Amino acid sequence: MNTMNLLLTFCALIETATGLALIAMPAVVVRLLLAADISGPSIALGHVAGFGLLSLGLACSPGRDATANTPPARAMLTYNVLATLYFVYVGIGGEWVGPLLWPAAALHAGLSLLLVRQWRLAGTRHQGRLVRL
């Protein structure tokens, strides 16, 4: 299994698990991430977010020859970069900081860096010539 397959598998497992947690208990996930309570329509929206993360995780489960320039890799990179930026933004604001916010931000940042690294490595091997991204 190549490095991109391993990385996408890891990302897909994390997002699938988070999606399932949001579907099953959105109030607990929000409490752990944002130290906030949700009720009513917010719970319904938490379920929908869970459906989205579950779908992302399933869609990004790699095949045998995943590369850095496949739709699953691009989707997972986009999601991780945006999640990192948003978690940092929320954390800096300081109003909604649960015990898992900063670890989640760090995890998504690390995954973003690993995905970018694989993308850059793939670019340097593209047709045997150096390609700067």
Image: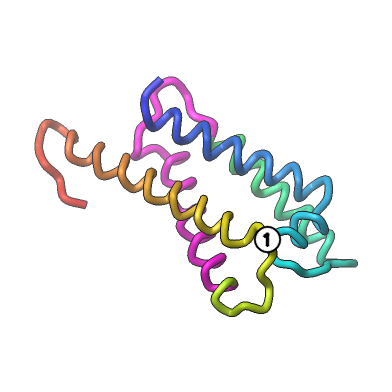
Q: Which amino acid type corresponds to the residue marked 1 in the rendered image?
A: Pro
Quadrant in the picture for the N terminus: top left
> Residue at the location (45% across, 35% down)?
7
Residue at which label 1 appears: 99
Across and down, in percent, residue 100 comes to 65, 57
Q: How many marks?
A: 1
Across and down, in percent, residue 6 comes to 45, 29
Q: What crowding class fits label 1: few (fewer than 14 Cα within 10 Å), some (14-19), or many (20 or more)?
A: few
- Dot 1 lies on which element? loop
> Residue at the location (76% across, 50% down)?
22
Q: Identify whether 68 is placed above or below 62.
A: below
Q: Looking at this view, is 44 or 12 the one in front?
A: 12
> Residue at the location (35% across, 32% down)?
67
Q: Which residues are magenta?
A: 61-90
In the rendered structure, the answer to whether residue 36 lies left or right of residue 100 reads right
Q: Main secondary structure of the magenta part?
A: helix
Residue sitting at the far left? 129
Residue sitting at the far right? 40
